[in-house]
Image: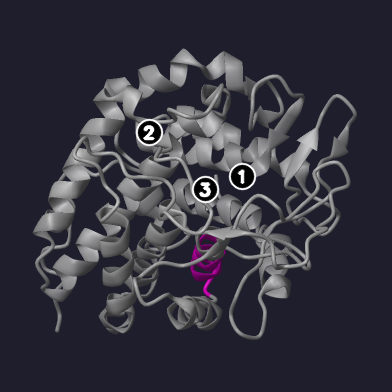
Amino acid sequence: MSLPAKFFDGALKRILELQRPDGAIPWFDKGVWDPWNHTEAAMGLAVLGHIVEAKRAYDYLASVQEADGSWWAHYGSAVNLETGRYEGTGDEPKKRDTNFCAYPATGIWHLYLVTGDVKLLTRYWQMVRASIDFVLALQSPHGEIRWAAPGPEAEPDDALLTGNASIYKSLECAIMIAAALGHDATPWRRARTALGEAIRNKPERFDRTWAKKDNFSMDWYYPVLVGAVTGSEALDRLAARWDEFVVEGRGCRCVLGEPWVTIAEGCELAMALMVAGDTERAKAMFHLQDQWRDDSHAYWMGFQYAENVPWPVEKPAWTAAAAILAADAIYKLSPAAGLFSRASTTEPHEQAQGLHHL
């Protein structure tokens, strides 16, 4: 089975119409942007062959990076979920989220896998190096990484499981970039090993200041998606809470207790299933998302199935990109398909051996 021609025309158009002339890709119309979702959207563009637009997105990231390697990110104030409209001013409080700061490394390695152009790794190396060093400066001796850098608005010294799992993947990609360019990434490898150990065996180190954090599906599947939990343990983890988070015929809940499935979570779960080796259920989960598209075939953010309405009434760039990346993992649309379809079987620096063309 393959995807029909023009299957992603609506999703692609949605990302392209949201990208600003400076290269930034906001969440949705008149919305804010952040480095994680911006990078996700750029990866979606790259899969579908829009390399110029993807590079413009990464050039924008490089141009607005702080001197310490971080990025500021608008956080939690972009949309009123009751109205489905952005009601901010663009001046809401911002934070430096470590997961957001690490994720561009994933995007740059992904861009290399798509294009095979090692010059792109050189072009963005300083951006990646600075951001990863910034993130790892906030790693504790226990292995977990603080979710937000201390700033004007004091944040609790806590680590988020989903965010740390995403950082685990970003470290894999950063290590492969370093190896391909001939740079020593020994400290990064040690940090990734410690982080993986914490994700697998130290649950008490995460979400210490959050109530009911395990109600979110991402905490359930992300350790599998990023390859921190593999093999039979990955299948066991997904099976343990499948009936809680998966709604038959609809997809994946974002949070328990609400009649609401979200398309990005469904697509990410499909990728986690691919990593765990369950290709058939991955395909089934991915294609459940087909029903949650508008007349142009752009994806809604989510669907409130008790009232049978899209909710919120937004079609984010990151949702479109998550669907594209899931399809790539399943149907091998690009040379980067393996990045989100299988767990690493070797250390990242070993995967990158032979890629040093400089």
Viewed as shown, does residue 166 lie left or right of 21? left
Residue 66 position by quadrant: bottom left
**Label 1: which secondary element:** helix
Disc nearer the start of the sequence (1/3): 1
Which residue appears at 52% of the width and 76% of the height? 57
Q: Residues within 10 Å of mark 2 (few under 14, many from 20)?
A: many
Residue on which disc 2 sits: 224
Which numbered disc, 2 or 1, marks the residue that appears first in the sequence? Answer: 2
Quadrant, the N terminus: top right
Range of magenta residues:
39-49
Question: What SS does tag 3 mark?
Answer: helix
Task: Please indicate, yes or no, whether residue 320 appears anywhere in the rendered image.
Answer: yes
The image quadrant of residue 103 is bottom left
Residue 295 in picture, x, y percent from top left: 86, 55
Is 58 above or below relative to 224?
below
The residue located at (44%, 38%) in the rendering is 162
Q: Locate residue 123 relative to residue 331 in the image: left or right.
A: left
Tell me, yes or no, if residue 6 can be seen here.
no
Q: Is residue 273 above or below residue 165?
A: above
Where does label 3 land, which residue? Answer: 326
Which residue in the structure is indicated by mark 1? Answer: 264
Q: Amino acid at mark 1?
A: Ala
Instruction: Residue 130: give x, y in percent of width and height.
Output: 29, 71
